[in-house]
Amino acid sequence: MTSGKFKKIFLLFGLCLSFSAFSDIQKIEYFDNQYYHPEEFGLRDLVFKVKISGLEEELTNEKIFGKIENLYFQVFWMYPGKFKIEVNGIPKGFDNRVEMLRQMIKTRMDFVIPQRLAPQMRVYTFTSKVEQNQKIFNGEDKTGKTPQRELQLIFDNKDRLISIKNMGSLGVNISKLKMDKKTWSKGKWVLDELNTEVTNLNNVTTTMNHKIKYLEENGLGLPETIIINTNYKAPGVDVKTKNIESIYTFSDYQINTQRAKQTIETAEKGLLKK
């Protein structure tokens, strides 16, 4: 295998990877470098809002919050990776529920600021092969430190990551990715669609399709909407599960205004005083 052939990719759903051979690390780093990271093009401070379709109605119907109106998330991010998520529109006194709502945004932060793969590769030992113009990397965690004991990465002949498969103590997770280049991405790959299928130990399968639409703001590409369609299938259930659709809408981007830095540092100082 030629040294230095993949170089940069984002982290998805807590995926932690590792290659033992230096040449293989260079290959993954190469793919990482071919993936779009807005901070490479000057992003240092970011503030934006997120709204989730149907969430206000869903929470109102629980009849414990009263009528929920103007519910949105305010996100503050600063380089190299600190962020703070505020939930606006929920009455005070529901701290646990607010934290659960924050997680809905936290798990989607990779769509805004993709994390890098190479720094996470400290546990797995990999073997690789080429089949039908695809590069296949099989990894194994021989230390037993992670729940994902085995995994597989597949890259196409353009060095795009097209598949991730995790196998571990919590079940099997298969992700399929579709990428393309945009007018604003400066030759880098951008994620357009992500399909995941997760089967847990009870053989309940959850499939999720993510379609991402971007906008260009100050020369940077950032999400405008993420449409997520979710289905659940349990063993022995013949009735087709109703599809659940959620639309995440991103707006009011503020780029490099130092507002995120000020907000995050003020929050950290407040915690230190407690």
Image (cartoon, grey):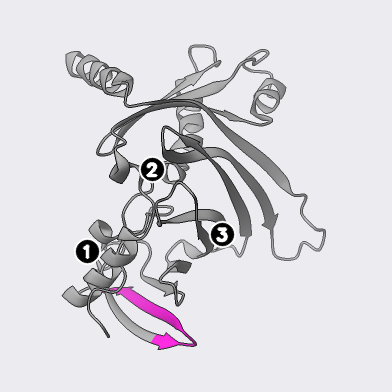
Marked residue nearer the N-terminal end (3 or 1): 1
In this rendering, is residue 188 above or below 259? below
- Mark in the foreground, 2 or 1: 2
Q: Which residue is mark 2?
A: 113
Do we see residue 21 in this rendering?
A: no
Q: Which residue is mark 3?
A: 196
Magenta range is: 130-142
From the top left corner, tell me how far across and down residue 1 is, in percent.
27, 85
Q: Which residue is mark 1?
A: 122
From the top left corner, tell me how far across and down residue 250 is, in percent.
54, 31
Considering the image in quadrants, where does the C terminus appear?
top left
In this rendering, is residue 192 above or below 23? above
Q: CA distance from mark 3 to mark 2?
A: 19 Å
Q: Amino acid at mark 1?
A: Arg
- Mark in the foreground, 3 or 2: 2
From the top left corner, tell me how far across and down residue 41 is, in percent.
31, 42
In the image, is residue 138 part of the stretch drawn in magenta?
Answer: yes
Give the residue at x 46% y 61%: 170
Q: CA distance from mark 3 to mark 1?
A: 24 Å
